Structure formats: C-alpha cells, structure tokens
Image (cartoon, rainbow, N blue to C red):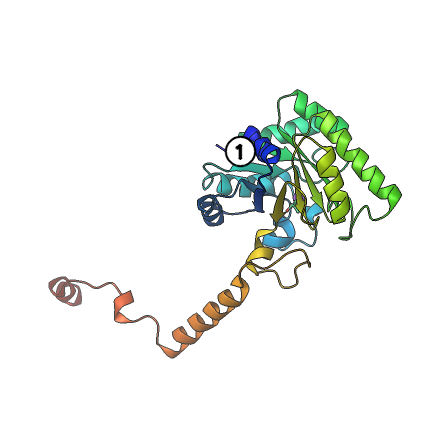
Amino acid sequence: MKNLDYLHRKKQTGAKITMLTCYDYPTARLQEEAGLDVIFVGDSVGPNELGFKHEVEVSLDDILHHLKAVRRGVEQAYLLADLPFGTYASPEAALTAARKLIDHGADGVKLEGPEAEIAACLAQHGYEVWGHLGYNPQRHEKAAVQGKRFDTAKALAEDAIALQQAGAQMLVLELVPEELAQLITKQLSIPTIGIGAGRYTDGQVLIVQDMLGITPRPFRHAKPFARLGEQMLHAFREYAREVESGVFPEPVHARNMQEDELLKVKA
Ligand code: KIV
Ligand code: NA
C-alpha cells in the first residue's frame, strides 16, 4: 500500500513521487496498473470533466460522485481528494467535509492556501492533510505564476513551513518558479509535489486530460504524453462515416437466431 510512510520514504531516498488527477473508473484502473503513487480527485474535475468555467463552481457532492468511481479502480495507490471551495471556511466545516471524503474512500484531503489553522485542526483529528500553495484556483481568479519576487517568494516559503508545522503531510506547489520550489523542497521534511514548478520537487502531478492531449490549449508545463484528443476525434468521425455509409455494423458484429426459432417467429 502506498501510504504516507511510503511517500515520505520516497523523499528521503530521493525517488520521485508520481501523481495524476483522475475523475473516473476506467482511468483509475489504468493509472493503478501503471503504478502511479498518488491518484487524485481534484476540483479540476470542474473545468476538465464537467465543463464548468472555474474550480470554485465544484461542490463537495461533485467530488464525492467522482471519488466513489475512482475508489472502485484504485488498489495500491494513495487516493487523494480535494476539499472544494467553501467547504473549509471554519474548522468545523472542514472536519465535516473531510469526514465525507474519507467515508467515500479518500486516504487524504487537500486544501488550498496558507490555512495552517484548518490544517492543524484536521491533522489533530487524525486526517491526512495535504497543502497546496502557489497558484490556487480557489483563491486566484486567473492562472499566474506566484512568488516571482523576493517578498512574495518569502511569504510563500513561510506559508509552506507553517503548513508543515501545522501537521500537513504533503505539499503541492503549483505555478511557482523552479528555484523557489527547489528551496521549499529542501527546507521541508514533508514531500513536495509540483505542477508547473520545475524539476526539483519531490514529485510531479499533471491534469490527466492535459497529459493525454485531450485539452485544447494546455499550459506550457503540461507536456502531452499522448494525442488522445486527435485519436478520439478520428474515431468519432470514422464511426459516423461508417454508420452513414452502411460499412458498420458487419455480419460479425450482429447476433443471430436459430433458423427454426426464426421460422416460428415469422409464422
Ligand atoms: O485539482 C487539481 O487538479 C489540483 C492540481 C492542479 C494540484 O489541485
Ligand atoms: Na485542486
């Protein structure tokens, strides 16, 4: 089982942690088979899977719905779920939301921003808490690199330490300069997972649609490891063409009756 101990040991030995977002059962099975360390139901489900304009539109029920599906496909990997926007405005609210995520199969929960107090409350109640600093879709309207200048970089590094001290067990760094992510990674004993944060974090995460090449215009940090969008479009067009022209289905795709049964039906 890829529990927190396993992930922390990876940092200690310098082995990279692998993580991807996931919103459905078939994808979860494939990520599990590929040996991903962390499979993550993020609020990026909104823009990437549900057609929402922004992450802040995602509800706890949306996350739970996808979490249940992903849980059915995950065996060894650590299953992380996002606390969506508005669900951790108070410690009590955070505890209620985290309880639901864990009850629906999450191993740990992630929150955004310098929320050391909330993180501490969750950790004290036994929840495995992940922090998330840098670009925070729940807090920043537009995607932009965070911590490029001395003052904002220093604040970000301090927030990271505060989250660790509060009991956060892992930290995602999104859209921060590579140099700052490297510095924070060195300063923390807990592992960092980067997205658009360069080469030196303890692990990497990408949005699954971005890395599969389904997203129309992904960010520069999102390397496409496949061109599934093109393949899907081709398959849809071919299907429509073959149905319209009568090429599909062929006899091999049909089911047939016994001749005597057919004669009785016709009679
Ligand atoms: O929801 C999400 O996909 C995330 C990652 C970008 C870390 O929070
Ligand atoms: Na998220």
Task: Identify whether 251 is placed above or below 196.
Answer: below
Viewer-nearest residue: 168 or 110: 168
Kindly identify the residue that appears in the image at 35 percent across and 76 percent down.
Answer: 247
Q: Is mark 1 within 8 Å of ligand 1?
A: no
For label 1, the residue is 104
Image position, residue 225 (x, y; %): 55, 58
Q: Is residue 80 left or right of residue 198?
A: left
User: The C terminus appears in which quarter of the rendering?
Assistant: bottom left
Image position, residue 86 (x, y; %): 72, 37
Task: Identify whether 196 is placed above or below 259.
Answer: above
Q: Is residue 260 left or right of residue 91?
A: left
Q: Quadrant of ligand 1?
A: top right
Few, some or many C-alpha atoms within 10 Å of disc 1 (few <14, some 14-19, many ≥20)? some
Secondary structure beneath dot 1 equals loop
Task: Identify whether 230 is placed above or below 48.
Answer: below
- Residue 90 at least partly seen: no
* Residue type indicated by callout 1: His
Farthest residue to the left: give it: 260
Kindly identify the residue that appears in the image at 71 percent across and 38 percent down.
Answer: 185
Number of numbered discs overlaid on the protein picture: 1
- Residue 44 at least partly seen: yes
Q: Residue 201 falls in which quadrant of the image?
A: top right
Farthest residue to the bottom: give it: 245
Viewer-nearest residue: 110 or 20: 20
Farthest residue to the top: give it: 124
Farthest residue to the front: give it: 13
Viewer-nearest residue: 157 or 251: 157
Kindly identify the residue that appears in the image at 53 percent across and 67 percent down.
Answer: 230
Image position, residue 147 (x, y; %): 81, 46
Kindly identify the residue that appears in the image at 51 percent across and 43 percent down.
Answer: 36
Image position, residue 91 (x, y; %): 72, 26
Q: Is residue 143 left or right of residue 124?
A: right
